[in-house]
Amino acid sequence: MIKIKHILFFFLIVFYSGFSQVNNESPSVQIKGSVKGKENFAPISGVQVSTNTGGYTTTNAFGEFRIRATVGDILIFESPEFETVQHRISSDEDVDVLVEGFVISKKEKTIGRMSSRSTFNHQRSLDSANFYKDKNLEKSIDFIAQSIAQLERLGNKEELSKSFTTLGEIYLYHKQYDLAITNFKDALTSKKTTKTTLLLGKAYILNGEFQKAESTLSPLLDLKNMIPYQRVRLYEGLGDANKGLSKLKKAVNFYQEGLQIAEKNQISPKIIDLNSKIADAYASDNRFIEAEGFYNNSLNLSKKVAPERLIEENEKVADFYNEENRFDDEIQLRKKSLNELKQLSRQTVAKENKGLENADSITSQQINYKIANAYIAQDKLDEAIPYLERSIVEADSEDDLVVQKDATRKLSEVYRYKGDFSKALESYQDYVAVVDSLYIRKEQEISRAARFNREIATKQNRISSLEQERELSQSKYSLAVTEQQLFQETSKRQKWLIYSLIFGIFLMALTTFLFYRSNKQQKLANNLLALKSLRTQMNPHFIFNALNSVNNYIAKSDERSANRFLSDFSVLMRSVLENSEEDFIPLSKELELLELYVKLEHSRFSDKFDFEISIDKKIDIDAFEIPPMLLQPYIENAIWHGLRYKEQKGFLKIGVDQITNEILEIKITDNGIGRKKSAALKTANQKKQKSKGMGNIKKRIQILNNMYKNKVDVSISDLLEDETGTKVSLKLKKD
């Protein structure tokens, strides 16, 4: 017992020390500074300035920046213009970075002088838009419109991208996700940046488009020079996208990757976020033990930061306890949330909750309502009533009609369960009154929302028009500058280009024609040679199988049958040899040969099968042609591998039917043992030897179809559902 206590004590010390570094934060200070060239002190705009704890900003047109950080944090300066620079903050003094080798070209200097004023006004408009982002949406959008208008025709793509990115962030803050996505896309069209790509991925996630979010964020995994905070946001976004796609294992892996980077770089807010999200993913996967461990981590971490964050985590874990029916733990945790809320002023809570995704759950009336529900789930109705009444009173004072409606209805149900019908009726009447008020308010909100959306659409259209006008103005300016040069270059090269194109087209056409003709002739010669070779192989194969039959009669000392068989066989062979040089013969001749061949095989296996050859009398058989010896191998397979092994007497049928005026179908069916059982009966030696007859038939059909445009089509299938019997269907087209 003493050893166990020592182990637990050691574990608590390690656990506390592991997280103490994350949360021991110094007071934050505002750091000012600039980034300029060392040789000429030229300001460098657009430099990404971030801290290892999550702060982020960019330098303005004068190369200046402001960022909040704490003593001991690391400032990271990143730009395509120079190698990444890091600086550890030791005090609140200004930080000035001088970059070696940064040179501005003459063209950039000229453009810089011409557009410095408009660039300054553009940045000032963006700053104003950010200032009004959470105060006045309309003013924010107006400042964005001003920023685009001030770019004029010399405005570069980078500044335009900043305007659209800022507008997207404004829409994202106000939950206008579709508009945010549109503007982030426009920003990326102007200039691709990591920041905007991350914001687009976040917008897709909030809009429920998880597949698009994953495809947007995944390419960023290959970037090497990403700052730690952005890398953490990337893994978090990919985790959110995969969680939305129900790929929980993959989501947890991304969250843990982000958590490792956040812990390594002491990014405290993200450590809490990712612990909480890992817990959510485990809970969704019904892995409640792992979920509870990470929830406890997020709770312990949030206790050492802002109280509002602790309340948020308390409520998330309480919801988890509710799903597991751990109502006592849920009630205890929600009561702690109520105590934390009491210590905060109403203004602080409202300010902190604004913009949170689950801000609705962090209100006193909502928490009281959830505590009451937990008591009701345990049939503790008397304990639930005070919390419902308190929730109703607080919701009424806060003008929260939704919670007031739910709590009043629940209170009426509780009184009805207790048998106090008069109070139940009174509460239900209050519920009806709240519902009426809520209905009226919803109508007003819908009307306001519609008007608000129309206003936003008007302003968005104005911004689109400004961008089109700016692009048109810039295009005209560029055309005017380059028109003279283009005219001169065009006049010099026009004739040369035309003659070159004519000669090239003629040469290409001649080469193509010669190659096509040569290739066609070679292909025809190869096909004819291959057909002749295959027919040459078919004849010995057929003769060999027939002589095996004669040999069988001789082995049985049946001289008369052998003589009769040889007589019929000689007639058959004469016809086969006569047709051996032809690609196609009349179908009537082929059917005569098949009938003679089947009779020969039937004379040998008369106890194994009977046969029938059925030809539709309406068919003009002489109008169709077929490759010689095409059907014989299929009939031979039916007899030798299907009917010969059947215990009862089998039946072979050859039928010829007309499908259309241009197509005949020849069916060869047998009720033998089937292909699967026949394959199982083969000896090891037989399995090693491939069927030459069937192989040759497939090659012949392939070559003939290539030469004569799909004249023959063959399919083989089982005749019956129990995989016995075989059906061969051959479709033949007219010439």
Image (cartoon, helix red, strand yellow):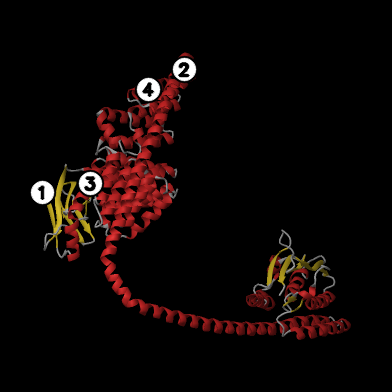
Most foreground residue, 609 or 499: 499
Label 4: how many residues lie within 10 Å, few (<14), some (14-19) or many (20+)? many
- 386 vs 605: above or below: above
Most foreground residue, 167 or 575: 167
Q: Amino acid at mark 3?
A: Ser
* Whether residue 689 can be seen here: no
Distance from the alpha carbon under mark 3 to that under mark 4: 45 Å
Residues marked 2 and 1 touching at CB (< 8 Å): no
Q: Secondary structure at mark 4?
A: helix
- 465 vs 535: above or below: above
Question: Foreground mark, 3 or 4?
Answer: 3
* Residue placed under numbered mark 4 in the picture: 392
Q: Amino acid at mark 1?
A: Glu
* Residue placed under numbered mark 2 in the picture: 424
Q: Amino acid at mark 2?
A: Ala
* Residue 494 spot, x, y in % from top left: 35, 76
* Residue 125 spot, x, y in % from top left: 23, 46
Q: Earlier in the sequence, mark 4 or mark 1?
A: 1
* Residue placed under numbered mark 3 in the picture: 125
Q: Amino acid at mark 4?
A: Ile
Q: Secondary structure at mark 1?
A: loop
